[in-house]
């Protein structure tokens, strides 16, 4: 027994030192518990500090509309949820939040919304991008997270000032994808993958990610998700635990789920393993982590993440942008949020990269090598 234990620990240490990983090795890392898990998290922290440094970059998150044309089976703001009051934040409210971000040294904002592709929506985002650039002397960096669009739209928004884009694949397993989305043309797996290609073509720093702990999801799926990100050669990742929402169809499978604490631990393991697999990308500490553990995002920063998205959505709208249950900070305004985060990040031993864009090093290298 002792021998066996020693052998497995040694083998684990060997895997941790690698730069490339087989699917089986990724599964061993993702599933690690106890002493081995501690080793993994320690290693990912070392790799993070060596490759991207100890700084955390702020991206002020503005959830500017919850109007959505999609019916994703897990999402609280899906089209079919009639309990949600729909909103479009006013231009002035969005621009005020951007001004706050700029004046407070956040350096970047993320504009996120439900998924629409009407000409009016495309125009509106375009105009907002130009205004945000104007009000900040071109200084604010802008990430968009507005779902699938045409190549032409992505190019147009890029020209108008957006330079990063987040589009989670949600799950890279086609079969699982269709268990969590309606099987129709509006929710096509192929189209989502194609959109990720368009984003690259348009010149963005491209981010994707998945939900962790979904019903029907296996460890092999998660390892494949990481390999998918590697193959796509992404620049950024945002991934977090799946959290059930009462008003969604996927809620019926809640009894199949791991406990929230297990999902949380698994999500941290995924962040750590991705840091080993793709050492120089930007990884966001997902807000969903904080819905399980009040210090969840800081814990992710300690094991591999280097980006955090303080919520700057005007408070009156937050109640209506509940993608999942227990979404944190529903009543905390931007000022409070900044102070609270600052204290927490310093406690976690990291430094905040105020007034720095904190671009993905992976992207910078990609541009230098022309890939
Ligand atoms: N409409 C945009 C933004 C979606 S909201 C788009 O399609 O890209 C941002 C992310 O929230 C989603 O990509 C999804 O991964 C996550 N999310 C939605 N519902 C969730 C849930 N119930 N639990 C955890 N994360 C969820």
Image (cartoon, grey):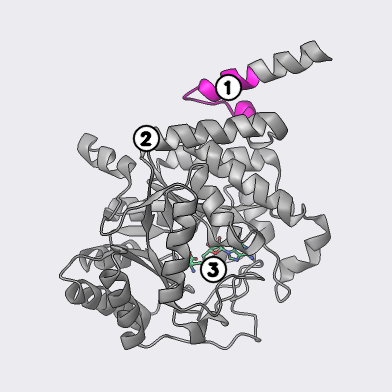
Q: In this view, does 251 lie above or below 229?
A: below
Q: Residue farthest to the top? A: 3
Q: Position of residue 120 (x, y in %)?
A: 35, 83
Label 1: which residue? Answer: 15
Taking the magenta stretch, the answer to whether it contains residue 17 is yes
Q: Quadrant of the N terminus?
A: top right
Residue range highlighted in magenta:
11-26
Q: In this view, does 313 lie above or below 179?
A: below
Which residue is nearer to you in this view: 255 or 93? 93
Q: Which residue is pictured at 80% across the width and 14% down the height?
A: 2
Q: Where is residue 141 in the image (x, y as percent from the top left)?
A: 27, 62
Q: Which residue is pictured at 51% across the width and 45% down the height?
A: 302
Taking the magenta stretch, the answer to whether it contains residue 187 is no
First in residue order: circle 2 vs circle 3: 2
Count of residue discs:
3
Label 2–label 3 contact, CB within 8 A: no
How far is mark 2 from mark 1, CA to CA? 19 Å
Label 2: which residue? Answer: 51
């Amino acid at each position: 027994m002792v021998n066996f234990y020693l052998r497995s620990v040694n083998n684990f240490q060997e895997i941790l030192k690698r730069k490339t990983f087989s699917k089986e090795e990724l599964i061993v890392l993702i599933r690690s518990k106890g002493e081995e898990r501690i080793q993994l998290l320690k290693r990912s922290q070392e790799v993070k500090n060596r490759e991207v440094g100890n700084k955390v970059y702020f991206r002020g998150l503005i959830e500017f509309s919850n109007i959505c044309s999609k019916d994703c089976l897990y999402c609280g703001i899906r089209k079919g949820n009639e309990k949600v009051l729909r909103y479009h934040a006013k231009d002035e409210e969005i621009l005020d939040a951007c001004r706050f971000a700029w004046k407070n040294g956040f350096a970047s904002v993320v504009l996120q919304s439900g998924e629409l592709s009407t000409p009016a929506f495309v125009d509106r985002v375009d105009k907002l991008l130009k205004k945000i650039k104007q009000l900040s002397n071109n200084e604010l960096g802008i990430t968009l997270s507005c779902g699938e669009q045409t190549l032409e739209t992505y190019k147009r928004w890029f020209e108008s000032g957006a330079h990063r884009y987040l589009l989670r694949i949600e799950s890279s397993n086609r079969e699982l994808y269709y268990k969590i989305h309606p099987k129709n043309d509006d929710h096509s797996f192929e189209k989502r993958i194609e959109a990720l290609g368009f984003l690259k073509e348009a010149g963005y720093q491209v981010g994707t990610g998945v939900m962790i702990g979904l019903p029907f999801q296996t460890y092999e799926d998660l390892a494949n998700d990481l390999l998918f990100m590697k193959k796509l050669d992404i620049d950024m990742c945002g991934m977090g635990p799946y959290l059930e929402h009462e008003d969604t169809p996927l809620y019926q499978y809640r009894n199949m789920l791991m406990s929230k604490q297990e999902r949380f631990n698994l999500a941290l393991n995924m962040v750590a393993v991705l840091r080993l697999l793709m050492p120089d990308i930007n990884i966001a500490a997902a807000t969903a982590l904080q819905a399980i553990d009040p210090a969840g995002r800081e814990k992710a920063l300690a094991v591999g993440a280097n980006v955090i998205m303080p919520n700057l959505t005007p408070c009156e709208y937050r109640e209506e942008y509940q993608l999942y249950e227990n979404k944190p900070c529903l009543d905390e305004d931007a000022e409070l949020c900044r102070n609270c985060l600052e204290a927490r990040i310093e406690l976690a031993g990291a430094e905040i990269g105020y007034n720095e864009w904190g671009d993905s090093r992976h992207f910078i290298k990609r541009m230098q090598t022309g890939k």
